[in-house]
Image (cartoon, rainbow, N blue to C red):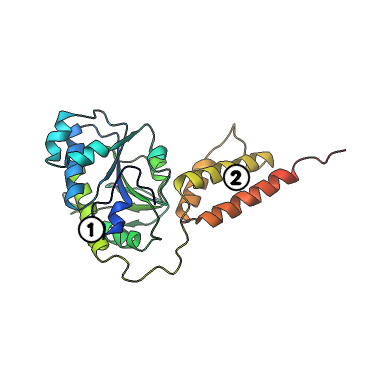
Amino acid sequence: MENDGHEATIDTVPLLSRVRIVLIETSHPGNIGAAARAMKTMGLSRLDLVNPREFPSAAATARASGADDVLMRARRHDRLETAIADCGMVVGTTARSRHLEWPVGTPRALASELSMLPSDTRCAIVFGREQSGLSNEELAWCQRVIRIPTDEQFSSLNLAQAVQICSYELRLAALGERASAPVDDEPFATTEEVANGIAHLMRVMAQVGFYNPSRPKLLPIRLQRLLHRSDLKRSEVRILRGFCTAIDESLIPPET
């Protein structure tokens, strides 16, 4: 697996080297630095930032308190999709009660699940804005959603605290990683591969009259949620796209 410039912090704990923390539109640079420090204490080194308000920043470096290397390697992105394009498992975080079309788990349960994924599966844990969290459109890119089970009377956690809790649970899971090997080690499809499959499927739907691009309604986002929840393997995406290609070819009029 290529490291994209991010080396594993602990060679004997591979899970930590393939999990990245993604922060979306962080408003205060100090929160980025504090999150980097929380990550480094637990052995995580991959930090991706989507449209931070201010970065690089002296405030971020000051709050990192020695985790400068994590900040220096942090990658900036204009869109969430590019930050998670090569990931086979994307986990969204939420602090709010909202209607979601998939179960909401805990960081501990999620960390255990990640440790049992095929060993080349890159993973992302995505944190939203300090005030509003992730939008429903951003959550639609996720296969899993987690909520930290805080006290109902006082559920306020700052961004770095949330990153610390999730990083801690990942470390515990990583220290006991591969206690029993997964039965199926076939790679998961990446976010980019699934997105390309969805785009192909929607083109075919439009060709056969099932989908009207000028009046999309809720079909695109529902289809996105459906396929992202399905834990598709690469071979399954190839089957889907092969079927779409067959439909494409069947619609070509025969030569006269």
Residue 121 rendering spot, x and y as whole percentages: 40, 55
Q: Nearer the viewer, residue 61 or 221?
A: 61
Residue 253 visible from this viewpoint: yes
Cα separation, mark 1 vs mark 2, equals 38 Å
Q: Quadrant of residue 77?
A: top left
Relative to residue 196, is residue 185 drawn left or right? left
Residue under numbered circle 1:
171
Residue 81 rendering spot, x and y as whole percentages: 42, 39
Relative to residue 72, is residue 240 drawn left or right? right
Residue 156 visible from this viewpoint: no
Q: What residue lies at 20% left-to-right and 32% top-to-bottom? A: 29
Count numbered badges in the picture: 2
In the picture shown, does residue 255 fall above or below 100? above
Q: What residue lies at 15% left-to-right and 29% top-to-bottom? A: 58
Secondary structure beneath dot 1 equals helix
Q: Given the image, on which type of amino acid does mark 2 rest?
A: Leu
Residue under numbered circle 2:
201
Locate the C terminus by quadrant.
top right
Q: Residues within 10 Å of mark 2 (few under 14, many from 20)?
A: some
Q: Given the image, on which type of amino acid does mark 1 rest?
A: Arg
Q: What residue lies at 47% left-to-right and 48% top-to-bottom? A: 225
Q: Earlier in the sequence, mark 1 or mark 2?
A: 1
Q: Nearer the viewer, mark 1 or mark 2?
A: 1
Residue 243 rendering spot, x and y as whole percentages: 65, 51
